[in-house]
Image (cartoon, rainbow, N blue to C red):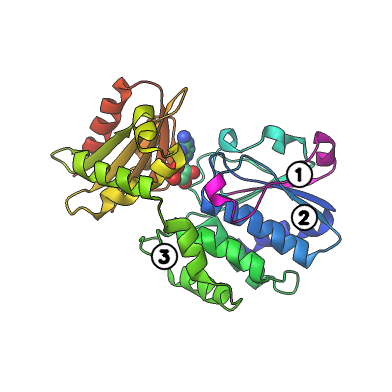
Amino acid sequence: MVNKKKEIIEAIKKYPTIIIHRHVNPDPDALGSQIGLQRLLKHSFPSKEVFVVGDEVDRLLFIGEMDVITDNQYKGALVIVCDTANISRISDPRHELGDMLIKIDHHPEYELFGDISWADPTYSSTCEMLVELSMEFHEDFTLNKETAKALYAGILSDTGNFMNGNITPRTLKMVSHLRTYRFQPERIHNFLNLKTKNSSRLQKDILMSYKVTNKGVAYFIITEDLFNMYGVDRVEASNLINTLSSVRGNKIWAFFIEYPKEIRVRIRSRNIPIDSVARQFNGGGHSLASGATIHSWEEVDQVIQALDQVCP
Ligand code: AMP
């Protein structure tokens, strides 16, 4: 691994232009690692041009905003893709236009891509990997407060506010290091965790009417009508996924969210691996936090049955 990290540093040093991508429908770890890395590189190598590209989510604009760049700017550039396991999920297909491609990711590596790939699911988050990189190579990299904020947001979110089993002594060491930069963590907690009134009302509806199988697979279907009824958008509604985690007996919980051309499935589990089920339905992710895409309401039953089957 040290060699991989060294290769990454050497590539970063070599290229004057670096363009950073991450996955579609970004979460705080995708954005935090992308924007955190941009700030880290800009601060450490002021003469380099470092850009971030991809789709934006209003709720997460507090982490940072995307750049608008031309195809021409990819000529001779280094492209780094953060937090993305599959090529098909990279936001902005222009990652192919660069001179060299590097992947930095904490998902299990089922799909190899990139000239250099540092993929390691033992990290809680891609942000944790970047903090470690900056600490190990502190002669090349200088962290600052703005970088620390972005990286903290990613770790906070991917560890479920430090409640998930993916926290290791290393995670806490990285957080402890970030905390020396004197940002206000409560502001980041508030941005990520405070809900609107409408969203809280939908949460009540979810708790009142979700279904659960005999095996303990809890699920809730969020249709377009429901968003409209409560006046929330899809992302806000999707973020309520862990509402079902607080109920004793719910071993696995899933949301089915209606999009114009597909149904997104978000699956979470306390300790039963569910990523194999996600992969059966064009998805993937982590052992206890996965996602998938289906195309008909009939498939909802199939997903529930498959989840039932992995329940002991
Ligand atoms: P989410 O429920 O969207 O937060 O996703 C949980 C995890 O599963 C994240 O690590 C995602 O990157 C991954 N994931 C979600 N949807 C898909 C998909 N359709 N294909 C592959 N991985 C996915």
- Residue for point 54% across, 45% down: 26
SS state under label 1: strand
- Residue for point 36% across, 20% down: 296
Residue type at tag 2: Ala
Image depth: mark 3 or mark 2 in front:
3
- How would you rate the neighbour count of disc 2 (Cα within 10 Å): few for under 14, some for 14-19, many for 20 or more? some
In space, the residues marked 3 and 2 are separated at their CA atoms by 30 Å
Q: Give the quadrant of the C terminus.
A: top left
Image depth: mark 3 or mark 1 in front:
3
- How would you rate the neighbour count of disc 3 (Cα within 10 Å): few for under 14, some for 14-19, many for 20 or more? some
Measuring from the top left, give residue 6's x and y in whole percent. Answer: 70, 62
Front-lying residue, 229 or 18 = 229
Identify residue for label 3.
Answer: 167
Magenta stretch: give its range: 58-82
State left or right for residue 182 relative to residue 185.
right
Q: Quadrant of residue 139?
A: bottom right
Q: Give the quadrant of the N terminus.
A: bottom right
Measuring from the top left, give residue 16's x and y in whole percent. Answer: 85, 53
Q: Any magenta on residue 293?
A: no
Q: Earlier in the sequence, mark 3 or mark 1?
A: 1
SS state under label 3: loop
Residue type at tag 1: Met
State left or right for residue 214 relative to residue 296.
left
Q: Any magenta on residue 69?
A: yes
Q: Quadrant of residue 168?
A: bottom left
Q: Give the residue furthest to the left.
A: 214
Identify residue for label 1.
Answer: 100
Identify residue for label 2.
Answer: 11
Q: Assess whether mark 2 and mark 1 are in contact (beta carbons under 8 angstroms).
A: yes
Can residue 202 be seen at all in this image of the molecule? yes
